[in-house]
Amino acid sequence: MMTGQLENMIAETRQTRLEPKAFFVAWRGVLTLAFTGFPVELVELKQRLDTLPLRRENQGSKWPKMTLGALGDDSKVLTADQLSSLSTLCSQMSTNLNLLAHDFTVTRVSFVLFSCRSLERILLCHEIPLRDDAGLPGTLEVSADQIQAVDQVMAELDDKSGYLVEVAKPGNRAAHYQGDHSEATLVAFMGNNPDVKMILDQFREAVDFLLPGYYTWFRDDALHCTVRCV
């Protein structure tokens, strides 16, 4: 009953897309691609999901992003200068995201039972197509609240000294994402698009040139935006 109700809620959601905003250094030095905000179609889906007896939503899925990679281990700690250089690089490389404004389409949501948080090892994946109302919407609708939520997260980086404390804390290294951990989640996979892969490759190469040996990158076929844990 629960599975059918969950699947129906997803299937009733209209196809949409995510708009890329910027490459971003998140807490613990995790590298992400942040989106402008969840579009109205996914916000409404998340609201419907909240009516079900699911686990409490994780903070990480309350703003849309794609986690690209993490520091290799706890011995890799970014200094203030490295964080500044990496943040500058993220800003510079984010200009390329204009080329991908229409490439992060969400035409299906996947129910995934995974055995590691990066989704590089999956036990079960059930894809649920979204409602096709003559294709994707012509205009992307992202509410001011959604835009503000992402802006607030990214604005934390403006406090360089305070943010460095969060970046330097142990945890959320590669083993956190690639080590054994089983859970169920709803995601939109979006790393296999050739145009997306090209821009991501350029970003990863630039980061590796700046900080050789620091980052572990997750496989393209595992890259996703989390809608919600279930």
Image: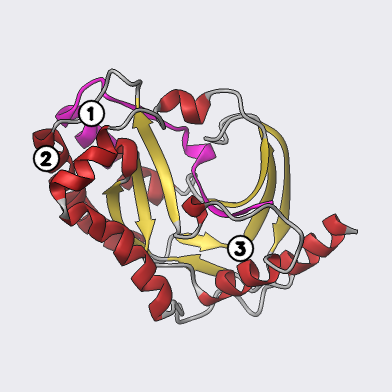
Residue 15 higher or lower than 227, as above or below: below
Q: What element does badge 1 sit on?
A: helix
The structure residue drawn at horizontal position 32% and vertical position 36%, both measured from the top left corner, is: 28
Residue that mark 2 sits on: 85
The answer to which of marks 2 and 1 sits earlier in the sequence is 2
Could you say where residue 196 lies in the image, as x and y percent from the top left?
39, 50
**Span colored in magenta:** 202-230
Looking at the rendered structure, the kind of residue marked 2 is Ser
Upstream in the sequence, badge 3 or badge 1?
A: 3
Q: Is residue 56 above or below residue 172?
A: below
Left or right: 191, with 200 as reference point: right
Q: Camera-side residue: 83 or 57?
A: 57
Which residue lies most toward the left here?
Answer: 81
Q: Is residue 99 visible?
A: no
Few, some or many residues within 10 Å of mark 2 (<14, 14–19, 20+)? some
The residue that appears at 29% across and 36% down in the rendered structure is: 204
Question: Disc 1 residue type?
Answer: Asp
Q: Residue at x 65, y 57 (%)?
A: 109
What coloring was used for the rendering? Answer: secondary structure
Q: Residue furthest right?
A: 1
Instruction: Give the Cα separation between the discs numbered 3 and 1.
Output: 32 Å
Q: Amino acid at mark 3?
A: Thr
Disc 3 target residue: 107
Image coordinates for residue 213, horizontal then vertical, percent: 26, 20
**Considering the numbered disc 3 on the image, is that residue within a helix, a strand or a loop?**
loop
Identify residue for label 1. Answer: 208
Mark with earlier residue (2, 3): 2
* Label 2 – label 1 distance at C-alpha: 12 Å
